[in-house]
Image (cartoon, grey):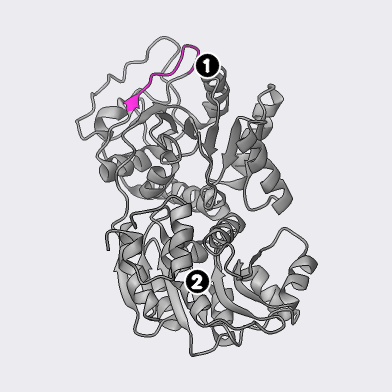
Amino acid sequence: MTQFTDFALAKPIKQRVAENGYTTPSPIQQQAIPPALEGKDILGIAQTGTGKTAAFSLPSIHHLLNNRRKPGRNECRMLVLAPTRELARQIADSMIGYSKGLGLYVTSAFGGVPINRQKRILQRGVDVLVATPGRLLDLHDQRSLDLGKVEILVLDEADQMLDLGFIVPLKKIVPLLPRKRQSLFFSATMPKTISQLADQFLTNPVQVSVAPQSTTAERVNQKVTYIEQADKQRLLKDFVNQENPDHMLVFTQTKHGADKVVKNLNAVGIHAAAIHGNKSQPQRERALGDFRKGKINILVATDIAARGIDVDGVSHVINFDMPNVPEQYVHRIGRTARAGASGISFSMVAPDEKQFLRDIVKLTGVKPDIVPLPEGYDEPSREEVAPRIYGQKPKRYSAKPTRGGPPKNKHSNRKGRPGGGAKKKGGPKHWNNAAKSFKRRQARKADA
């Protein structure tokens, strides 16, 4: 299918698609829409930003129109499960746009806001409910939601569901659904756990996939600098004062880290706000609204909280903490340089984050420009890390102390050489430090 008009969609739906400015379907839409229109289950492997929402929304709306019936009290005809509030809201907004004027009622339900209003809406029955798993079970447990007549089930971002610990809620939801239904299941990756989960939701699914995005935007000027973790906050402040960005997104690995960045920026008169899972829904909406309107120029977010955020005009993306999954880097910097504009990404790489950068370079094939630290900053080590990251042999340095003595490197577990040590590796001390490094990475991931 080369045009949306080629799909066997109802005429009003095609009109809504055209009104939204879409003419050519994306690869995932080309693969998923035809079998979905036939009522088949779908197992889709696709990254965020590939057009998944339209891929499941358009054929589902077509089904609801062609098989129109009034939903009963506390019922929904179509259920969409999303991992975060922002993504749930974005999906609901998209489906409202696609079904505008067609007589379908679309609503969303998620935590962080009072549940009573959501109960009142569900009392009269809705055609489409977009919900997070936790709030969905709350509504069901309080007898405000009946899932016994769901005709279409969509599970979006299944891998993120598992990362957020939703595997148990999802397993509780399955028995509440009717056996006879159409199920559409989407995930960016397909590890064994996800595959087993899909088996519980799907029946003889049609598998569709889009290769993970591994290329970074050509108009993004990618820069990196090597810096001690303790100096990152100071460098961020200096960078903001120098660049004076219009709209800057700053990514951290943890919720605590995001709050700390905002607190330190605000302390020096730089207005910023954070968005992450510990913020209430009104707080998140206010921060995002202020960012869109230009009331604040800096929004600090974790990767999970940033899913579902769609903001135009982002001029800078800052990797305050490097992502430990290289594809996340592509997603992060892809939020700038949109609609023909150019953008800047700036990554602060601490000594224990060098491997993350190597993985990113390996995935993307792009070598970001290395920016030296400004005067007044201490280099993280005397090892020339850039050539090693970019596949060249690093230079060796003499162990002879320089003025002021050899630099301290808290990340080194070896002695005798600056930034290095004895050639022999292994032993209890090496294992202990490796274990501590692993625990730090796991803790950062768990707190995101």
Q: Where is residue 117 in the image (x, y as percent from the top left)?
A: 78, 66
**Main SS of residues in magenta:** loop
Q: What residue occupies the far bottom of the structure in this picture?
A: 179
Which label belongs to residue 242? 1
The residue at 66%/24% (across/down) is 270
- The reply to whether residue 168 is in sight is no
Q: Is mark 2 on a helix, strand or loop?
A: helix
Tell me which corner region of the image, top left, top right, bottom left or bottom right, holds residue 397.
top left
Q: Which residue is drawn at 45% across and 78% down?
A: 183
**Total residue callouts:** 2
Residue at 45 percent across and 27 percent down: it is: 227
The nearer-to-camera label among 2 and 1 is 2
| Alpha carbons under labels 2 and 1: distance apart | 49 Å
Q: Between residues 349 and 424, which one lies in front from this camera angle?
A: 349
Q: Earlier in the sequence, mark 2 or mark 1?
A: 2
Tell me if residue 231 can be seen: yes
Q: Which mark is residue 416?
A: none
Left/right placement of residue 126 relative to residue 97 reads right
- Which residues fall within the magenta stretch? 369-377
